[in-house]
Amino acid sequence: MMTPQIIEKINLFTPAEKITSKIICGDSFDILKEMSPNSIDLVVTSPPYADQREKTYGGVSPDKYVEWFLPISGELLKTLKPTGTFILNVKEKVVNGERHTYVLDLILSMKKQGWLWTEEFIWHKKNCYPGKWPNRFRDSWERLLQFNKQPKFNMYQESVMVPMGDWAKNRLKNLSETDKKRDDSKVGSGFGKNISKWVGREMAYPTNVLTMATEISNKNHSAVFPKELPLWFIKLFTKEGDIVLDPFLGSGTTAIAALELDRNAIGIEIKEDYCQLAIKNINEQLKKYGKN
Ligand SMILES: C[S@@+](CC[C@H](N)C(=O)[O-])C[C@H]1O[C@@H](n2cnc3c(N)ncnc32)[C@H](O)[C@@H]1O
């Protein structure tokens, strides 16, 4: 096994403000075991998908996925602050003509492990390749599962507000009587809305479907996610100076996003060449932003 190699980079913006990016080359499980409990504000990560990238970084069989991931999520549970959030990007693959259930099994097992499954976001990939399959259409979305340690966690909703859009022009023009008072859900969900409250407002809270640009600039890693994805979650769940961890760092996207928003970053990557690629990408980004 590769000896964990720790490369630490410290950037000073002002004498009072110190933002650190720590990139660790090694196995997440081994490194996480050594990390302090309750020390991380946000985990954003995209682990290897089941069997998907065998040729590049070793796949995990769909049947063994939960067994492989649980020790790591157990360490993340220890490492995350009680007010912190864990965002897990994962999508089940098709095996023998049907969707495998390892993601669903993983959610149930993580709940037993002590996590709360608080939310699920959909990443709508608008630029996926055209294609034809005999029994399904092309896949253009992935899951971003949100887990927390407790129901009350840090969330800065104002930081991701979106313009109201054309919807408001028509919908808010002629309000019915129901629209003017709190209208409790007819299905008994406990949710209620008072649409008139939004008249005259320019910004609204977003939905849980994310449609950010999916242009990926880094071609040296085979499974990169767009920087907009971690940027959005970092804005939503952390504030400046907080600590963001990606235990499957790949080319360094999460760390780059964290540094761009003045959050401290910790990244763990098992493959030596990806680890070096992440360090190179982070350094380039720091130069671009004049933070180095
Ligand atoms: C899906 S990729 C992450 C890509 C990343 N989000 C990006 O934008 O570049 C998963 C990464 O996890 C790494 N990995 C796999 N098993 C690991 C482990 N046990 N510990 C640390 N890294 C691991 C792989 O080498 C791969 O680079």
Image (tube, helix red, strand yellow):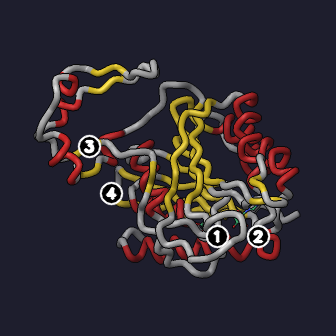
Is 197 placed above or below 107 here? above
Q: Amino acid at mark 3?
A: Ala
Residue under pointer 3: 204
Residue extending farthest front? 134
Is 290 placed above or below 201 here? below
* Mark 3 CB within 8 Å of ligand 1: no
* Secondary structure at numbered mark 1: loop
Q: Nearer the viewer, residue 247 or 56?
A: 56
The residues tagged by marks 1 and 4 sit, at their Cα atoms, a distance apart of 35 Å
Callout in the foreground (1, 4): 1
Q: Nearer the viewer, residue 263 or 200?
A: 200
Residue visible at 61% across and 49% down?
A: 88
The residues tagged by marks 1 and 2 sit, at their Cα atoms, a distance apart of 8 Å
Residue 267 locus on image (x, y percent): 62, 58
Callout in the foreground (1, 3): 3
Q: Which mark is residue 86?
A: none
* Secondary structure at numbered mark 3: strand
* Mark 1 CB within 8 Å of ligand 1: yes
Image quadrant holding the C terminus, namely bottom left
Q: Which mark is residue 14?
A: 4
Q: Nearer the viewer, residue 49 or 219?
A: 49
Residue visible at 67% across and 59% down?
A: 248
Residue under pointer 1: 223
